Image (spheres, rainbow, N blue to C red):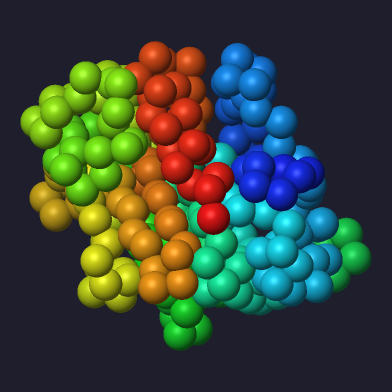
Amino acid sequence: MLVAASSPGVATLHVLLTIFVSCMPVGQVWLAKHDKHPDVISDDDLDAVASGDVLARDYDLIVFPGHEEYVTAHMYDVIQRYRDLGGNLAFLSANNFFYKVIHSGNRITGRWRWRDLGRPEARLIGAQYVDWNHQIYENKPYTVTGVEKAPWLFRGTGLRDGATIPGTFGIEIDARNALSPPGTRVLATIANEFGPGKTAEMTYYETARGAKVFDAGTINFGGAARRPLVAKMLENLWDRLRRP
């Protein structure tokens, strides 16, 4: 389910009631506590939006709190166009825009990796899916690496480079690659979380048109919204990205 703001200048929040439905109570508590009032629409509704121009006209920010793994070509087109027009995006979980699917009536068919179809998700998100834990690798805390690259995100947290963001994060992870937009910044990492070379990266980039795009880099960052430091980072993120 997608959440979007109903008045100009207020953020949009995209909430998926799929695999990560268990995260919904956490998100609802965070929204209520911080007095946020976004609009909510479903993936079906997003697939029915005429174009990214419509979203860019009405919303400054779209947030994907659960991982948006399966998307239609139209959904991809709409969100990419929104970003290209300067719309802001926040991905609070990893593994987004990974598979292409076809939506027909009440059925979804097909499962093709977008990166194999010439549309690697890193170009949109800033990072892309690396791997999952294979029920072997334990979740771990992030290590902060980029306070100076996004001081607004860490404001009021007391976090400095080298500090840890308390919690256990992972399950599935994202990281940058050569196709990430120029200037994509790494803000925090979980080094070698799933073995050598498989590091989770929290990333952020901006475009010449003014779009601001954040990717948490792990499945359960948004689901940790009850943790004080994560809650504060989410508040900082919301306040920064809700502005045009």
Q: Residue shown at 72%/43% (left/top)?
A: 5
Residue 59 position within the rendered picture, expressed as x and y whole percent measured from the top left: 67, 54
> Residue 147 versus residue 67: which sits nearer the camera?
147
The picture quadrant where one finds residue 189 is top left
Q: Residue shown at 42%/32% (left/top)?
A: 236
Quadrant where the N terminus lies? top right
The picture quadrant where one finds residue 56 is bottom right
Residue 138 position within the rendered picture, expressed as x and y whole percent measured from the top left: 27, 29
Q: Residue shown at 46%/72% (left/top)?
A: 209
Which residue extends farthest right?
105
> Residue 225 versus residue 109: which sits nearer the camera?
225
Quadrant where the C terminus lies? bottom right
Residue 114 position within the rendered picture, expressed as x and y whole percent measured from the top left: 50, 74
Left or right, residue 150 beside residue 76: left
Left or right, residue 61 beside residue 4: left
Residue 15 position within the rendered picture, expressed as x and y whole percent measured from the top left: 66, 41
> Residue 189 versus residue 151: which sits nearer the camera?
151
